[in-house]
Amino acid sequence: MDAFINDRKNQILTKGKDDATIACGKASVAGSVSQRACVFCGSRVVLYPIADALHLIHGPVGCAAYTWDIRGALSSGPQIHRLSFTTDLKEKEVVFGGEERLYKALISLIETYKPKGAFVYATCIVGVIGDDVEAVCRRVTRETGIDVIPVMSEGFNGTKKDGYKIACGALAKLIGTDTTYEAPEYSINILGDFNLAGELWMLAEYYKKMGVNLVGAMTGDGRIDDIRKAHKAHLNIVQCSGSMIGLAKEMKEKYGIPFMKVSYFGIEDMSDALYEVAKFFKSDEMMEKARTLVKEELSVLLPALAQYRQKLEGKKAAIYVGGAFKAISLVKALRLIGMKTVVVGSQTGNVDDYNLLKEMCDDGTIIVDDSNPNELSEFVKQTGADLFIGGVKERPIAYKLGLGFCDHNHERKEALAGYEGMLNFAKEVYASVCSPVWQFMK
């Protein structure tokens, strides 16, 4: 590991060679050009799919680059979240302050779009010039009757993970504000699914077939009114634990709602996610419906996967994603189609996640926390990976090295969750790894 920054050595281990526990959850090393995103990005990821809310970025126009086009959470109704609003701060506001500009923007947008609520995202420059965003939000709330919630997400104020916490704090202000709602039996909230390519709708249908009622989703296809009554659900199911586990813990403490962590990627984890809910509600009928559902889905899926496994058997994959819980599911899903994981890492994994990855992976697998392009390129070359699974920042690494790529981040437009998603995943991996184009790149 001499080629890597010395301060990062304890964040990289090789299964079978290094016995130490991987270091994680620490600030990125200066100069390492981390793949991590900032606080602002983390808060946007979580809140952005709330479709009937106004999302206003208080900052320069460039900070509004995270649009619906690259983070395509789908909505079954309102589409306000697809619009990218910003106060577009210029030199004048940087010198004299941007509070009046923010106030006028909020009043104008609320009059025009009549949202159910509004989130105002503070960016780096707002933290520097010191605008009192919270005071402006309180003023607009008083004058319009719309909940305008400040999201103090100055990018320099931590990492993407800190942005998750701030976003969960914003959601917590809404939860519990509808005191009239009474939830039906077997009610759940789904936390941490963002309805990419309609995945939430597939999951909701699975639960519906089992007799489980969905109170609200936070935040895929989200609605302000559903979030207000989410405290009445009987169980929180947390898909993206990196982003939502903090809110789940807060709801358990404040409202007594238990939670469970699940993954919807791959056959094994998807099935467990259904069975665990039936176990929680102690319903034999629900368990039987879950078994029937799984049996029916697998009777179609397994024969369809066989042809892809035949072509992919023995191929090697590198994984670098935001949350380590997703990486765990991907290791299992790759095994199902005959592939071996040789590199695996994440931006926000914790010690438990990495210990599980170490336990699951074969000797020689490189496990890395908070990596960067140079390291990832080197790892891929060392291990001879045939496929890179990551997001938009990892795509160019794969293509420059001449190997297949699978987008498993929020930029993708295809459902990869659930049983249907597993088949989509196999098709995409096969098309990328076995494409004839790579013979001209190596």
Image (cartoon, grey):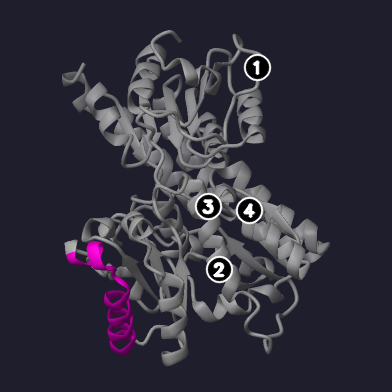
Inspect the magenta stretch and tell me whether residue 105 lies in it: yes
SS class of the residue under badge 1?
loop
- In the rendered image of this protein, does residue 333 appear above or below residue 222? above
Q: Mark 3 points at which residue?
A: 418
Return the mark for residue 427: none
Return the mark for residue 20: 1
The residue that appears at 68% across and 86% down in the rendered structure is 179
x and y percent of residue 90 in the render? 19, 63
Q: Looking at the figure, which quarter contains the C terminus?
A: top left
For the residues carrying marks 4 and 3, which lies nearer the camera in this image?
4
Report which quarter residue 278 is drawn in: bottom right
- Number of numbered callouts drawn: 4
Asked if marks 2 and 4 touch (Cβ < 8 Å), the reply is: no
Return the mark for residue 171: 2
x and y percent of residue 336 in the render? 54, 33
SS class of the residue under badge 2?
helix
Q: Nearer the viewer, residue 418 or 30?
A: 30
Q: What residue type is labelled 3?
A: Gly
| Residue stretch in magenta | 92-113
x and y percent of residue 329 in the render? 56, 39
Q: Which amino acid does label 4 sit on?
A: Ile
Work out whether residue 82 can be spotted.
yes
x and y percent of residue 370 in the render? 47, 32
How far apart are the alpha carbons under marks 4 and 3?
A: 21 Å
Q: Name the residue under label 4.
A: 245
SS class of the residue under badge 4?
helix
